Image: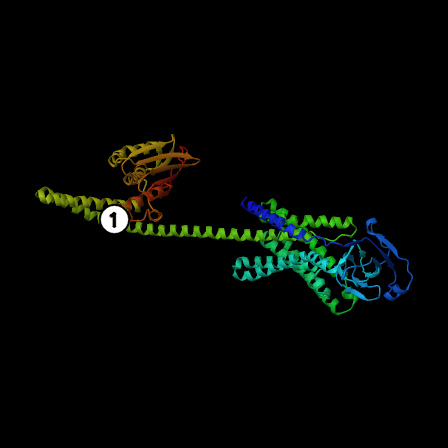
Amino acid sequence: MNLIRKCSVLVIVLILLGGIFAPLKSSAGTPPDEIRLKTWKVLWEKEIKEWDEISKGNHSWETINIEQGLPDVPEGVRSAWYRVDLPKLSWGQPGLGIYKLYGREVQVVSFDGKTLYNSVRQFGLDQYRLLLPIPSQQDGQSLFIHVKTPDDRIGIQESMLLGNYQEMFPNYVGSGLTNILLACSMILMALVMLFCSVLLRNAYFSSWITLAVIVLSFGFLILGYTDFVLVILPGYETALDMVFGAALISLMLALSVYFEKLVGSGPFLIIRRYRHLLVVYSLLFITFQLCNAFVSSEYFNSYIFSLDIYGMLLVIQLALLLIISIVYSVKKNFDAILFIIGYAIFSIPFIGELVWFILKEGQYDLVYWKWGILGFEFVLIIMLGRRIANNHERVIRYSKELEMYNNELQHSEKMEIISELAASVAHEVRNPLQVTRGFMQLLNHRSGPKEKEYLDMALIELDRAANIITDFLTFAKPELHEVILLDLGAELRHIESILVPLANMQGGQLKLHIEEDVFIYGNSSKFKQAFINMVKNSIESITVKGLVIISAHKKGNKVFVHIKDDGCGMTEKELARLGEPYYSNKSKGTGLGLMVTFRIIEVMQGKIKFTSKKGIGTEVMVEFPYGELNNPPIPV
């Protein structure tokens, strides 16, 4: 949902920007005093006629009126002469705008035989957009346009404009610059991506490079399909054709690699195997094209290795990617769903224009497919950005888990060392303490009042040392002895009765909120030892009129016990050290009590969690497995 919301915001921003810049485009308008030419004459050629024959001969010209529709081209005709009769011209430098003319070879000749324009194209782009400066004459004159093509599309397809050349030139350039700017922006974006790739980690490097190649290929495809490039760079028809072919090859290969990296290879690795086939075909295609460029031979001009066949292979690949995307999207692969969305953004205008091209019998040029490409690129960038973001989140999650496991390992090792130390030392220390205590009791009966005071203090400290030893032994071997089904309510009420006097002495209150029929397996005495220690800590943390709440409830197959107080609370640093030996917030505390509590809860298959805020209070949450009469007891 977050991704969809961000994409919606981006679309709204683009629409607003389009609304801002639309008036700028429309403000240019059409220059005034232009004449729209809707009629001209044509002479279909079955045999090529040179200008000398046209200028001297008497020929039967056929009149064309664009408002009445274009005539059918005679069968077998692949060249024609067009005669445009111009009215009287009053401009200092007149200009003639021809905005849709189909052909591979175009020659424009003035009435006096002067060649105004001549172009020969050896590649697939057969549409011309021309703005020609013509000689200024007070009397009417005629222009002759010779068109040759091996294709079915031929000749002038739209009305022409006659006007002031200087006023027509900005509109002519502006209409052609849109595709140039779109292509150049893609190429620039791809180059920036390539430069930025050196800053990426190896995990993202190949995907980022592949995406940059896709964007670069799309940019050169649009550039190669734009006839306005030849206005800027006349004479580079062959180079433009080679750029278009190279862009088509790199696009096919890079798109399949990108899809495989982000979505998958598909069943039976079909995407990878199809790409291997394309690599072999591409090498043969390049070889034949280079040989055809340098060696004039019909052998190297094979239709099998032409752009038409390559275009068919591209359509097959796009169909495969769409089918595999649908297969993965059924499996809830979000990258596949995104690819389908991007594919739809690209294919809907492209297929619509292709259908219209067929309905118009080839008299239409594809325009809007370029904007579909732009939308497709945005989706591909979103796919990669989403993958990088997911990997970043995964790395952060793994780092946190690794830190947690490392802390648990350190804690486990520390507890194991303390357990071994406690088991080996406790018995050895307890025996001398008991002997010492016995002799001091004997001395106490035979001593005077002053000596008794000192001996009593010594006995108290010996008892305190003995309790520490007992805690050590409990921590080292927290045996539950007798494991029974405990009624949690009864156990906690017993603990309440023991600790209510202590709470009253602190000036606070102790309250219970316990559900009925909440049971766990454990040892009653150890359970009381652990919870008395925790509740006692909560009571000692509160001030006058403080409150300690003990609650217990069952949720699913778990039992939860909460001990909450409104005492002094702890910082995050203090919370992190809870359970460590010899760490305590009390002035005379050893930290062993809470350490023993952790061990008892652990042996009873429980989990304990502390949450606290300084000056607000602390809450302890203990989780146990729910105990039922037919359940086996906890293994000790």
Say whether residue 278 is visible. Answer: no
Which residue occupies the foreground of this view, 467 or 142? 142
Q: Look at the numbered disc 1 and give the secondary structure of its residue.
A: helix
Residue 577 at x, y percent in the picture? 33, 49
Asked whether 563 or 515 is in front, the reply is 563
- How far from the left and from the top, in percent, is residue 370? 67, 53
* Picture coordinates of residue 318, whole percent (x, y): 67, 52
Crowd around label 1: few <14 · some 14–19 · many ≥20 (10 Å) = some
The residue identified by callout 1 is 426
The reply, left or right, for residue 120 in relation to residue 416 is right
Q: Quadrant of the C terminus?
A: top left
Residue positioned most to the right: 58
Q: Nearer the viewer, residue 381 or 104?
A: 104
Q: Amino acid at mark 1?
A: Ala
As drawn, 46 above or below 6: below
Between 9 and 385, the one lying in front of the other is 9
Image coordinates of residue 496 in percent, x first then y, are: 29, 33
483 relative position to 59: left or right: left
The residue depicted at 78 percent of the width and 61 percent of the height is: 104
Q: Residue at x 37, y 35 (%)?
A: 520
Position of the N terminus by quadrant: top right
Furthest residue in direction bottom, as rendered: 294
Q: Does 469 appear above or below 97?
A: above
